[in-house]
Amino acid sequence: MPHELDREEKEHAAIRLASYLRSERDEEWSDLAVQLLLAEVEEQLGPLFYNRGILDAQRTLATINETIEVNLDALKRLPPASKRGAR
């Protein structure tokens, strides 16, 4: 999977997951069990979160692009009026 967490991120996530299981579910899981659950969650749900991040980035860039276009339009200048037609 090209969008995997790195080693430090996995360790942090495993600690958080084990803490959740302990505090919210009153369950003690082995390190291996937590790592296996995390790997499954990462494989099954990771792409959904990744795709949501891509969508959010696209929306943000579209908003920024629109703002840039408005600002650039405001900077446009008209050429001076022709003096030839003033006669």
Image (spheres, helix red, strand yellow):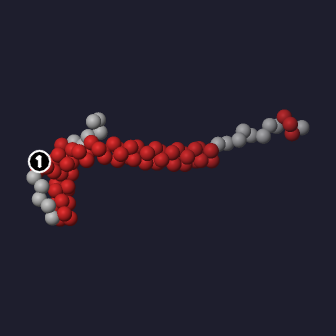
The amino acid type, in three-letter code, at marker 1 is Leu
Asked whether 62 or 33 is in front, the reply is 33
Q: What residue is rendered at 59% in x and 47% in y?
A: 70
Q: What residue is rendered at 80% in x and 37% in y?
A: 82
Q: Secondary structure at mark 1?
A: helix
Q: What residue is rendered at 55% in x and 48% in y?
A: 67
Count all numbered tags in the image, as a single digit. 1
- Name above or below for residue 31 compared with residue 24: above
Asked whether 87 or 30 is in front, the reply is 30
Regarding residue 8, the answer to whether it shows in the image is no
- Dot 1: within a 10 Å radius of its alpha carbon, few (fewer than 14), some, or many (20 or more) residues? few
- Most distant residue in the left direction: 30
According to the image, label 1 marks what residue?
Answer: 32
Asked whether 29 or 16 is in front, the reply is 29
Quadrant of the image containing the C terminus? top right
Residue 42 location in percent, x, y? 26, 45
Asked whether 71 or 1 is in front, the reply is 1
* Relative to 27, 82 lies left or right: right
Q: What residue is rendered at 20% in x and 56% in y?
A: 16
- Name above or below for residue 25 compared with residue 60: below
Residue 19 location in percent, x, y? 17, 60
- Name above or below for residue 26 compared with residue 49: below
Regarding residue 79, the answer to whether it shows in the image is yes
Quadrant of the image containing the N terminus? top left
- For residue 17, what is the image quadrant? bottom left
- For residue 26, what is the image quadrant? bottom left
Residue 49 location in percent, x, y? 35, 47
* Relative to 60, 81 lies left or right: right
